[in-house]
Amino acid sequence: MTTLKSDLPQGTLDLLILKVVALGPLHGYAIAQRLQQISRDVVQVPQGSLYPALHRLENRSLLVAEWKLSDTGRDAKFYRLTRKGRAFMQEETNSWHRLTAAVGLILDAAEGEAS
Amino acid sequence: MTWLGRLLRRNRVERQLDAELRDHLERLTNDYRRSGLSEQEARRRARLEFGGLEQVKEECRDVRGTRWLDEIGQDLRYGLRLLRQSPAFTLVAVASLALGIGANSAIFALVDDVLLKSLPVREPQRLILLDDGSWTNPIWEQVRARQFEFSDGAAAWSDVRFDLSRAGATEFVEGLWTNGSFFDVLGVPAVLGRTFTVADDDRGGGPDGPVAVISYAFWQRQFGGEAAVIGRTLTLDRTPFTIIGVTPPSFLGPSQGRSFDVAVPLGTQAIVRGPRNWLDARSTWVLTIIARLKPGQTAEQATLALRGIQPQIRAATLPQEWPPPMLDQYLRDALTFVPAAAGPRDFRTRYEQPLWIIMAVVVMVLLIACANIANLMMARAAGRRHELTMRLALGASRFRIARQLLVESLLLAGLGAIFGLLFAQWGSQTIVRQLSTPRSTVALDLTLDWRVVGFTALVAIVTALLFGVAPALRIRGVDPNDALKEQGRAFAGEGRRPLGTPLLVVQVALTLVLVMAAGLFVRTFGKLATLDIGLDKGAVLVVDVDVSRTVVSPEARLNLFERVRAAAAAVPGVAGAGLSLITPVSGSGWNGPVEQPDRPDLPPRQRMTFLNSATPGWFTTYGTKLRAGRDFDAADAVGAPAVAIANETFIRRYVKGNPLGQTVRFERGPQGVKPVQIVGVVQDAAYRAVRDPIPPVLYLPLTQAQAEENPTRLSLSVRAATGSPVLLTKSLAAAITEVDPDLSLTFRPLAAFVDGALVRERLLAMLSGFFGGLALLLAGIGLYGMTSYSVNRRRAEIGIRMALGARSSRVVALMFRRIAWPIALGLVAGGALSWWASRYVTTLLYDLDARDPVTFIGASVFLCAVSAVAAWLPARRAARIDPARVLREA
């Protein structure tokens, strides 16, 4: 299992979290699980470092949290996307696409020249 | 969420953070367990994968921005521990800060109330005052008739003292005569009942008869705040009034420094005073006139509008009895409105300069206290050098350590501010009590409001920065490597950074200014208090005798007064008794222009003489010496030639040659010009005030008073044969009541009037003396501390010097040399500062130059002496160091 912690570009974790949470309110553990599942275990975040990111997003009002009864029978903290968070996610997603497209172009062109 | 909210909710946030992370760990562990791992292995793997719980928490706190709050909490706890460890330091620092900050808050509370605040009424900035003087009721009635031509409404009032008693001893309350719309124009609603209507102000009382509005304080004091007070009867000067309303607690009255108990409509004066009312008196100047500007109107525009109708107002109110030149002046004097958001300005004008001076004084005291504490803190920081360098060496940031020192400073300042506020409450109330005189009780609204608390907090923070920054900055120069090196340097001197020398210079300079100011004000007061005012102020008791409650006819009044005088004179222990119309130095007076045959061209204002009526023996009662001629005697009766006694100033100014037998003529009310023959000359004696030059005064015999002048109230002066005249009060009251039990009597020693005339001077002397002494004490403590510190640091060096043969006198000299220069520099700087500041106090001094060399030299010598003692105590300790012990320790 490869840990891609160092390979995750700055700020990407925030975007991934927002995307995951956009599907519906989740607690921290579920977010970590979902990230792993969706990325087919390629993206694996050290679980602890998820929380500073969650709290940062909450602090910026991109997420709101609510304590609700969970499947374990105890209260868990569920995160939900705010309107502001959704807008932010949209914008970041677009710019991510633009960036990866641009980077892809450059990489392809560079290969072509070399061959 | 605000920082404060976060701080308060910190515990909950912490708990939630912990619950959230633990929940995660548990789920992770459960999943591993389900995948078949043993309990122990599952836990281990989960913890491994999750990372350090505490690190994650710390990162989360960082993200939330509460970490610095936690750290400040740590700093505070650490600071408190340190303060508890050195109680002596804490006590000295907190006490001097409490005095310094408290003094600032106390004086600020006064400055704020007297100089900065507006009246607590609706839109006070729209209030304007008619020329800041007094007006007659006929003028007010003219203004009232045309008030809406120049304003949104006008109001008038006059201060008065009412006697509340129905029988027996008088009981005065502060009263107001107001017009009907007074409370409406000011915008003061009633908290209970109603305020006046215009109809209440009808002469002789309105539809509800004579009505009164009482103040909140009076309602609480007199009626215990009971709601049934509306409709109750209040007896004012023997006239029953019905209480109709109570004003809000914030409204003390329209004039600063004076609070009212009862307000009654002007029109009721016709009932209370009968024919003696001044409702139609055209030269009784007692009313203050205030008006409310129309929206958008300026005081200048209102003045212009008023000037347009001024000729009609003036023409309708001409004082009939005045001579033509004065009438011309009367018609010409232009009416002017001035802005009056704070009401009339006389109280403010009187105390503005003294208050600013005292404010400057307390700021300087606080600076001196700051310098002291800065020095102490630096000495402590030097003592903690090892600890601090060690922390630096272990990786603490300089910022963190500087912050730790600043937090300690804030802690000290905060403690000082809390005790200071208590001291301020007491202090400002004490000062206000000092302002009251027999004639007027000074009342200010000194409740602790957010302005004073805010000011105190601000002062505390600035103070903490002032004394906390210097020690914090010294951290910059600390080298972590010294932590280990310096340990061995037992023989080190004070090093390249001697403590607080510039601070000492500042301290000495400021202290000199304060001691100098104290010297000037105390000497001014001393000079005035011992001034020969031509009256024996220690021997005389003044009794206000009022006959208006008796049934005696006006013609028989003088006779009744004479019987009262005779009864008083017969009391054992009384050396003499005399009656007069005016009580000296009580502030009241009576004047009129003298005719001067040589200079008919002089305007009336330059020919004014003051007048008083007195009985035979009145001068001897006061100890005023007869310079020539005779005192009044029984022969000076009605029908006999009119006579008068003049004072020396009168003779000097208006009479040529031998004054005795000469006739002077003066204008006297409706009777026109009256000729009197001078039969005596008396020493100049204070008439109205103590400080002013003594004016020309003409004394007339009370026995020749005109029948229509029969006063209802005279001043009986009684001279005690020995001892304090106040001791005579009881026997005098008994003797006088025997003459007529319905007389109203008010007893006050003459000394109280004299003191009352010197309130401002006494206040300045008292406060500047107190703060000058405090400054000296603080400077002394600072110097003592500094010298002690340097003796301790140089113990080893001194020991070696002594071992090598230095005599103890040389050691003392060594310690003294260390402080001689800063003190000399401080004296020079302080001298320059006082020289510059002298311009602000000149007008408050009496018979003394603000740059008086005697005071300056005296203050310098005194300061040097205090410094010498403060430095000598620790220096002597240095001289007693035992060289053998020091060398062993090394």
Image (cartoon, coloured by chain):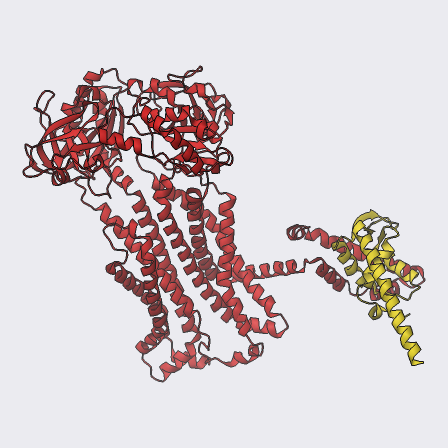
Q: Residue B230 placed where, x, y %?
A: 48, 21
**B207 w.r.t. B314: above or below:** above
The residue lying at 56 percent from left, 71 percent from top is: B387
Q: Nearer the viewer, residue A83 or B373?
A: A83
Name chain B's colour. red
Q: Would residue B164 be seen by someone viewing this image from the given angle? A: yes
Could you tell me which quadrant the C terminus of chain A lies in?
Answer: bottom right
Choose top left, top right, bottom left or bottom right for residue B178.
top left
Q: Residue B507 placed where, x, y %?
A: 39, 63
Could you tell me which quadrant the N terminus of chain A lies in?
Answer: bottom right
Q: Nearer the viewer, residue B740 or A89?
A: A89
**B359 w.r.t. B159: above or below:** below
**A69 w.r.t. B66: above or below:** above
Q: Would residue B784 be seen by someone viewing this image from the given angle? A: no
Choose top left, top right, bottom left or bottom right for residue B810.
bottom left
Q: Residue B30 placed where, x, y %?
A: 89, 58
Side (left or right) of B22 relative to B377: right
Residue furthest out toward the bottom = B804
Side (left or right) of A97 relative to B497: right
**B441 w.r.t. B520: above or below:** above
- Numbered circles on residues, count: 0
Q: Nearer the viewer, residue A13 or B92?
A: A13
Q: Residue B14 placed where, x, y %?
A: 72, 55
The residue lying at 81 percent from left, 60 percent from top is: A14
The residue lying at 60 percent from left, 73 percent from top is: B392
Side (left or right) of B630 relative to B869: left
The residue lying at 74 percent from left, 55 percent from top is: A59
Side (left or right) of B87 relative to B174: right
- As drawn, the chain in yellow is A
